[in-house]
Amino acid sequence: MKLVVGLGNPGVEYEKTRHNAGRILVSILEKKLEDKKIKFITPDTFMNNSGPAVAKALAGKKALKDLIVIYDDIDLPLGKIKISFNRSSGGHNGLNSIIKALKSQEFLRIRIGTALAAPSGKIKKPKGEKAVLNFLLGDFKKSELETLKKLSKKVGEAVEMIFTESKEKAMSLYN
């Protein structure tokens, strides 16, 4: 079984936050991609404790090749994605939890940009830990949610390509 996990926090108060970009996209993809061989989950745990839920849903170490984790990335501008494989968590606590629970980082990730960008394309990232936290736990504006919905088409195509062709082809086309 192929598994696509959307990271975020459960609860109405977090529903539209930037930190829930993964959950939001997986909820959209689940409706768009009606492939019975793909299981979509959004763990009912908080982001930083996602690992045990993902490990429980995964059918052993061999299933790592069929795992895609989708999550927010404040280092990418809103509307951009980055597909990677077998990388560190980059300081993302949700990913840290998954790597620790799986005892491996050999799985695919699709990072969803949440940062604001200047017209020049330069990322406008908040300064300081508190400002970053407030930004991530802040709600997307209506226009930003529309951008995510549009992005779901590209993410859906990438997921399908990863599972039907190869991760390398998806990375070369979508990164």
Image: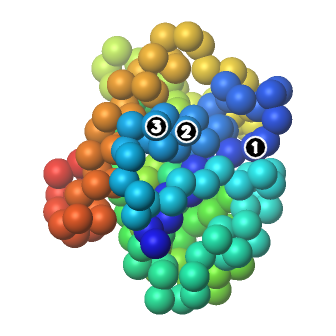
Colouring scheme, one of rainbow, by chain, secondary structure, one colour: rainbow
* Residue found farthest to the top: 142
Give residue 148's quadrant in the image: top left
User: Does the image show residue 150?
Assistant: yes
What residue is shown at x 37% (from left), y 31% (from top)?
A: 151
Mark 2 lies on residue:
27
- The secondary element bearing badge 3 is classed as helix
Q: Which sits in the foreground, 164 or 80?
A: 164
Q: What amino acid is found at the position of numbered circle 2 in the picture?
A: Ser
- Give the labeled residue for mark 1: 9
The answer to whether mark 2 and mark 3 are in CB contact below 8 A is yes
Which quarter of the figure has residue 131? top right
Q: Give the CA distance from mark 2 to mark 3.
A: 7 Å
The image position of residue 29, as x and y in percent, is 44, 41
Q: Position of residue 147 (x, y in %)?
A: 42, 21
Q: Which residue is mark 3?
A: 31
Question: In this orientation, which residue lies closer to the viewer: 116 or 86?
Answer: 86
